[in-house]
Image (tube, rainbow, N blue to C red):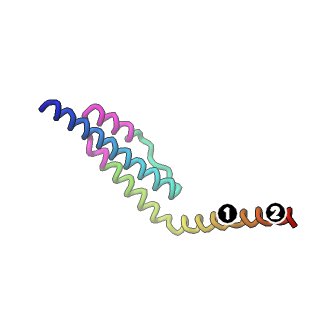
């Protein structure tokens, strides 16, 4: 029974680490897409250490969820600006492609 309890505790610890890292990845991805800087207060590292030591803190996971919600809300407020930036970047890429095309086609003419 003790071996099974130990195995289940290890499995639980592993799943908690996965959850924490998944939340961190989600937060970083949203921040990257919206050009926001994520908070870096060491909570991720602290969470992993807490899980490894057996002191699982559900408060940390809820904190990550709040950060994700906050970043999503802020991103929603920037939606119009981000759409315009994306259109501008697409136009710049197209202009660059056209310039390259014209340069190359002039070489073969």
| Structural crowding at the residue carrying mark 1, measured as other residues with C-alpha within 10 Å and reported as few (<14), some (14–19) or many (≥20) | few
Tell which of 3 and 85 is nearer to you. 3
Instruction: Look at the picture and state if 2 lies above or below 74.
Output: above
| Structural crowding at the residue carrying mark 2, measured as other residues with C-alpha within 10 Å and reported as few (<14), some (14–19) or many (≥20) | few
- Dot 1 corresponds to which residue? 93
Which residue is pictured at 16% across the width and 34% down the height? 4
Tell which of 84 and 9 is nearer to you. 9
Looking at the image, the residue that sits furthest to the front is 108
Instruction: Look at the picture and state if 34 lies above or below 13.
Output: below
- Give the SS element for disc 1: helix
- Mark closer to the chain start, 1 or 2: 1
Q: Position of residue 74 (x, y in %)?
A: 45, 60
Q: Position of residue 36 (x, y in %)?
A: 50, 54
Q: Are marks 1 and 2 in contact (CB under 8 Å)?
A: no
Which residue is pictured at 81% across the width and 63% down the height? 103
Residue 46 quadrant: top left
Which residue is pictured at 39% across the width and 57% down the height? 70
* In front: label 1 or label 2: 2
Query: Please, what is the dominant secondary structure of the magenta stretch?
Result: helix
In what quadrant of the picture does the C terminus appear? bottom right
Instruction: Look at the picture and state if 65 lies above or below 79.
Output: above
> What span is in magenta?
44-61
Give left or right: position of 1 versus 25. Answer: left
Instruction: Look at the picture and state if 13 lies above or below 68.
Output: above
- Give the SS element for disc 2: helix
- Dot 2 corresponds to which residue? 103
Q: Position of residue 51 (x, y in %)?
A: 29, 36
Q: Position of residue 71 (x, y in %)?
A: 43, 56
């Amino acid at each position: 029974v003790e071996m099974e309890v130990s195995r289940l505790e290890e499995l639980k610890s592993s799943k908690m680490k996965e959850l924490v890292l998944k939340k961190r990845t989600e937060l970083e991805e949203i921040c990257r897409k919206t050009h926001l800087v994520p908070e870096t207060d060491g909570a991720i590292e602290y969470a992993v250490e807490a899980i490894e030591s057996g002191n699982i803190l559900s408060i940390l996971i809820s904190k990550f969820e709040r950060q994700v919600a906050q970043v999503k809300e802020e991103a929603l407020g920037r939606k119009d600006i981000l759409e315009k930036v994306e259109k501008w970047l697409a136009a710049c890429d197209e202009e660059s492609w056209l310039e390259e095309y014209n340069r190359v086609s002039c070489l073969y003419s």
